[in-house]
Amino acid sequence: MAWWMLLLAGLCEVMWAVGLKASGGLKGSFTTAGIVCCMMLSVFFINIAIKTIPISIAYAAWTGIGVVGVTIVGVSFLGETLTLSQIIFLLLIATGVVGLKLTTSIVTGK
């Protein structure tokens, strides 16, 4: 359950970061409220996750999910491009998050 909460926290990170880009600098109050709401939800969900997952692991995974998620959205919907080396390093980040999940599950039994 904690890893699902961490995934939700990471997805909320993606939403607020993409929302920040889309808002053009927090120009609209509705958009700003949505961004702040996503930020608060992200912190809420990671708070639940760190009750079970060590903070060092949870924080690394949280930021990794955010980095990879924002990159996917940026490339898929915002016309951003990546070089081959950037793709390789993003895959390493994603592999690291999965590895943290797998090894933390083994160590804690959760």
Image (tube, rainbow, N blue to C red):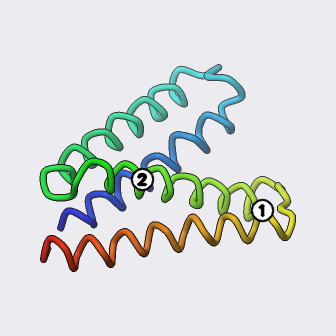
Residue 41 numbered mark, or none: none
For label 1, the residue is 86
Which residue occupies 14% across, 58% down? 52
Which residue occupies 61% across, 22% down? 26
Residue sitting farthest toward the front: 107
The quadrant of the image that shows the C terminus is: bottom left
- In the displayed structure image, the side of residue 41 where residue 16 appears, left or right: right
For label 2, the residue is 60
Task: Indicate whether 30 appears above or below 105.
Answer: above
Callout 1 secondary element: helix
How far apart marks 2 and 1 lie (CA) works out to 19 Å
- In the displayed structure image, the side of residue 48 where residue 90 appears, left or right: right
Whichever of labels 2 and 1 marks the residue nearer the N terminus, that label is: 2
The quadrant of the image that shows the N terminus is: bottom left
Neighbour class for label 2 at 10 Å: few (<14), some, many (≥20)? some
- Residue 21 placement (x, y as % from top left): 68, 37
Front one among 89 and 14: 89
Quarter residue 102 falls in: bottom left
Quarter residue 44 falls in: top left
Quarter residue 109 falls in: bottom left
Callout 2 secondary element: helix
**Amino acid type, residue under disc 1 in the picture:** Gln
**Amino acid type, residue under disc 2 in the picture:** Ala
- Residue 103 placement (x, y as % from top left): 31, 75
Front one among 56 and 28: 56
- Residue 5 placement (x, y as % from top left): 26, 58
